[in-house]
Image: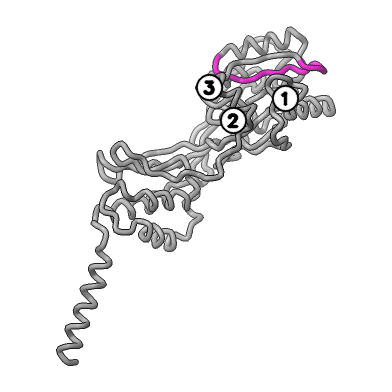
Amino acid sequence: MDTKKIIVAILVCIWIGLGAAAQPDSIKKVLDSSIMLLRTHALHGQRPDWDYVRERAYELAGEATRWEDLGPAISWLFEAVDDHHGGLAVGNTTLRWERTELPFLSEALKSELAKGNHIVRKMLPGDVGYLRVSEGMSLLDSLAALEAEGARKLIIDLRLTVEGAAYPMLEGLSPLLGNGYFLGNADCTGKILDMTRVDAPAGRSKLGTRTPVVVLTGHGTGRAGECIAVAFRGRKHTIFIGEPTAGHTTAGNGHWIVNGQVQIVIAETMLADRTHRTYPRNVIPDEWAPGGDDFEDYQKDKKIQAAISWLTDFY
């Protein structure tokens, strides 16, 4: 080989080496660690083709030299595992995947949510009691009042139940649930990690575990509302009517990649019901009733009317 060819070969090797080292080691560490942790811990970590995912992530990272510039690459990684709750925290900045197909909220739902949720109870035709769920043990008082007014069947409305502590609500609805373990968390394999026990108050009640119940759900049912919905899953004499819930049925866990500076939070656990069925995305109703929300006139509310029809036809 002549000298000119040797020089060209050396230059080609140098060029390849420089290309491979285009990203600083700190950027590589964050990308590679994120991929490894998502692959190991994410609920859907076994789904992607990780060779392709990694290649695409590095393409999206481009010539980034700062962690804060990894937004497109991190968004891609979280999209690959269908995790719109987790993210990469860099100082005061969080990089995440923003899911585009956000749940549609009807104008009636948005208007009512703007007022702030509160407990609403009323009697409907056919011995049907209606209870809109909000936070607080006063749910027990509402159930007692509905029983006194003659309710023998119930509509539990979770369409506006978003925020709040789920356990007090579960306690408030415990006469309908009974005693037992009705809500838990599972890991990505479906293994149950824990279950929450609920104990109904002592005393006889006509509204109990055998009471026919319709649970109304919608795109506004989130977080606490989804916990309540899952607790009712598997209950006898129960049907879910409405729309899929908002999709907050997972919980995240944090892992430091660069101590004190870069942390990745991954959705690693999901809700589980009394039968150990898991909910990695949301809660799907048994009977769909899209739209038609009317919180001013129950006679015009499509979901309430469907609930009354079911309770009348089967009970």
Q: Which residues are magenta?
A: 124-136
Q: Nearer the viewer, mark 2 or mark 1?
A: 2
Q: How many numbered callouts?
A: 3
Foreground: 209 or 311? Answer: 311
Foreground: 248 or 39? Answer: 248
Query: Does residue 300 appear in the picture of this structure?
Result: yes
What amino acid is found at the position of numbered circle 2 in the picture?
Thr
Whole-percent x and y of residue 53? 43, 59
Q: CA distance from mark 1 to mark 3?
A: 20 Å
What residue does disc 3 label? 167
What amino acid is found at the position of numbered circle 3 in the picture?
Tyr
- Residue depicted at x 53% and y 22%: 167
Element marked by disc 3: helix
Q: Is residue 27 above or below residue 282?
A: below
Q: Earlier in the sequence, mark 2 or mark 1?
A: 1
Q: Badge 1 local density, few (<14 within 10 Å), some, or many (20+)?
A: many
Relative to 18, 31 lies left or right: right
Q: Mark 2 near mark 1, Cβ–Cβ under 8 Å?
A: no
Q: State which quarter of the image contains the N terminus.
A: bottom left
- Residue depicted at x 29% and y 43%: 262
Whole-percent x and y of residue 204? 70, 10
Picture disc at residue 221: 2
Element marked by disc 1: strand
Q: CA distance from mark 2 to mark 1?
A: 17 Å
Q: Earlier in the sequence, mark 1 or mark 3?
A: 3
Q: Is residue 312 above or below residue 11?
A: above
- Residue depicted at x 58% and y 21%: 170
Whole-percent x and y of residue 225? 58, 27
What residue does disc 1 label? 213
